[in-house]
Image (cartoon, helix red, strand yellow):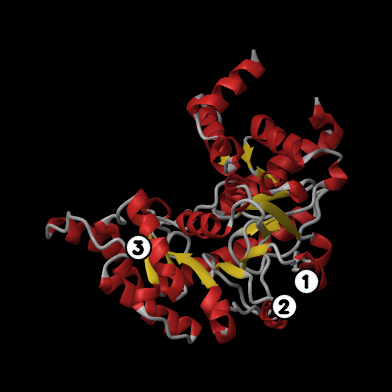
Amino acid sequence: MLFFFKKIRRNTINPNLLNLGTENAFVILGKAEKLKNEGKNIINLGIGQPDFSTPDHIVEAAVKALNDGKHGYTPANGLLELREAVCHDILKRRNTKVDPDNILIVPGGKVTMWHAILMFGGKNNEIIYPNPGFPIYESVINYTGAKAVPMILEDKTDFNVDIEKLKSLINKNTSLIILNSPSNPTGGLISKIDMDKIVEILDDNPHVKILSDEIYSRIVYKGNEFISLLSYPQIRDRLIVLDGWSKTFAMTGWRIGYSVWPTKYVKMSERLNINSFSCTNTATQYAAIAALKGPQDCVDNMNQIFEKRGEMISKELNSIDGFSCNSSKGAFYVLPSIKKTGLTSDQLQDFLLYHLGITTVSGKSFGEFGEGYLRISYANSEENIKEAICRIRNFLEDNKWENAKN
């Protein structure tokens, strides 16, 4: 019956769609909501969503836009005023000049991934991507028919890119390299020294395009420095940068992001906009203008809280039998190794959810080399994080991790 079902599906839809994966953080979120509706007390350390409200001045800008009758379409590449605001912000924070015509406003970060990987994917092409890494990279690579080539990140090297290994992965079929710093799910950050070395490799391989996922660019902790690939002029003609408002301004549900494109590819990406969603929500674009032009203390305050939580959760997890946790340098995730628990990532994820009421995400959800890890988001209150740790400790007082297999 299963064979028959698969055969029917392959005969009725584009078979490439069967190669699409998913983002298990949303799957886990759905399961957690179901348990909450059944009366269970669930602590959510799974979803990558700030537990802060969107700042009032941003909300008010969207309301004003609606009250002022801003209800129609905008250009497919976004409002000029917003693209100019993005360029000003890039100049201020990355010390790099960008033309508004090279900016595309899109509904969230995934659109830029989708467009870039569609453009440079396809049969006979190879795309290098971080693993463990954001799951949509590999999903879309597989959809296009390109070969997904993992760039393995490990806790023993603090999830840093192995420069020599990266160099060895590149060949004549490599069409695109995806970099993500600060990283989801590791909390890692590419240093200036390593970024210089990566750009040297890219300089030696002018046929390779680059997608730099910089969505967490403003969530970087003291003692660390965010390095944007936009600061390297020698690769600008083949560099695509992904950023947006979701994480920085607690605007995940507003669905708005932006991308910076080389001149020779920007019109093709704009055409993909037109063929899919026409334009980004108008009121949301006015909210995004207010976010960039308005007060920034909301961002600074949020980051201070995230940093405090990150320090606390790493310390607490390292005190739990079977866990080993690196410190987070940015974003709001840690990816502790759970190999010494004797459980698989999926087993521990499910045990924590169904028995202790804690949502996390199996490292395996972020690729093959995420097995043995567990992604924990500290975009939740300090009180809730401490309660989650307490639940784990209480379990381990009378049990060993092997009891979680039952």
Q: CA distance from mark 1 to mark 3?
A: 43 Å
Q: Secondary structure at mark 3?
A: loop
In the displayed structure image, the side of residue 124 where residue 280 appears, left or right? left
User: Where residue 218 sits: x, y (%)?
Assistant: 51, 72
Check the image and name the residue furthest to the top: 1
Q: Secondary structure at mark 1?
A: helix
Q: CA distance from mark 3 to mark 2?
A: 41 Å
Mark nearer the N terminus (3 vs 2): 3
* Amino acid on which the number 1 mark rests in the picture: Lys
Marks 3 and 1: in contact by CB < 8 Å? Answer: no
User: Where residue 309 sits: x, y (%)?
Assistant: 61, 61
Task: Report the mark closest to the observer, 1 or 3.
Answer: 1
Q: CA distance from mark 2 to mark 1?
A: 7 Å
* Amino acid on which the number 3 mark rests in the picture: Pro
In the displayed structure image, the side of residue 303 where residue 344 appears, left or right? right
Q: Nearer the viewer, residue 382 or 128?
A: 128
Mark 2 = which residue? 201
Check the image and name the residue furthest to the left: 68
Q: Secondary structure at mark 2?
A: helix
Residue at the location (30% across, 70% down)? 289
Q: In the rendering, which numbered label is found on residue 55?
A: 3
Mark nearer the N terminus (2 vs 1): 1
Marks 1 and 2: in contact by CB < 8 Å? Answer: yes
Dot 3, crowdedness within 10 Å: few (<14), some or many (≥20)? some
Using the rendered view, name the quadrant where residue 69 is placed.
Answer: bottom left
Task: Report the mark closest to the observer, 3 or 2.
Answer: 2
